[in-house]
Image (spheres, rainbow, N blue to C red):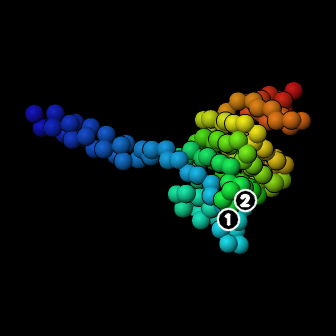
């Protein structure tokens, strides 16, 4: 009997531990316009959740032309988001030093714009004008040839 109670207690602790580590995906909207950091992706004041997006957040960059009028610029590497949506009229700039990895979904609606001089990893291959954005598996295949 005590053995069954021990296993039940251990099982419950295992489940509780796993459930407390699960983070739900939040939606974090770009607002932009924080004084002195207007276009800085890494400024928490530029986001609706008042935190820099991470791998557990879905990011939406809306058309902010009637609001702050400033769109995000990424100039550091190592950034991850769960999903990224560029709404019609929105712009995302990634400098040569910048890198963003989108883990699950990358969507563009209407006339959004990307200026990627750094790296943008997306779950599947995307094309934007003359720029070809490739997923990591495709890059690895090119390097092995």
Q: Secondary structure at mark 1?
A: loop
Residue under label 2 = 70
Q: Which residue is mark 1?
A: 33
Q: In terms of depth relative to the viewer, which is nearer, 109 or 124?
A: 109
Q: Residue at x 58, y 52 (%)?
A: 29
Task: Residue lying at the far bottom in this picture: please name it.
Answer: 36
Image quadrant containing the C terminus = top right
Query: Does residue 52 show up?
Result: no
**Secondary-structure class at tag 2:** loop
Q: Is residue 23 left or right of residue 71?
A: left
- The answer to which image quadrant residue 30 occupies is bottom right
Q: Is residue 138 left or right of residue 83?
A: right
Q: Position of residue 81 (x, y in %)?
A: 61, 46
Q: Which mark sits nearer the N-terminus, 1 or 2?
A: 1
**Which disc is residue 61 wearing?**
none
Query: Cβ–Cβ below 8 Å for labels 1 and 2?
Result: yes
Instruction: Looking at this view, name the residue that lies furthest to the right.
Output: 130
The residue that appears at 78% across and 44% down in the rendered structure is 113
Query: Quick one: label 2, few (<14), some, or many (20+) residues within 10 Å?
Result: many
């Amino acid at each position: 009997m005590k053995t069954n109670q021990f296993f039940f207690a251990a099982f419950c602790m295992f489940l509780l531990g796993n459930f407390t580590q699960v983070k739900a995906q939040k939606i974090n909207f770009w607002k932009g316009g924080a004084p002195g950091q207007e276009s800085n992706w890494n400024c928490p004041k530029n986001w609706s959740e008042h935190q820099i997006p991470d791998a557990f957040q879905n990011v939406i960059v809306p058309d902010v032309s009637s609001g702050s009028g400033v769109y995000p610029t990424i100039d550091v590497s190592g950034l991850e988001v769960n999903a990224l949506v560029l709404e019609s009229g929105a712009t995302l700039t990634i400098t040569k030093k910048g890198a963003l990895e989108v883990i699950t979904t990358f969507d563009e609606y209407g006339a959004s714009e990307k200026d990627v001089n750094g790296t943008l990893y997306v779950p599947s291959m995307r094309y934007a004008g003359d720029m070809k954005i490739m997923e990591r598996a495709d890059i690895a295949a090119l390097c092995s040839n």
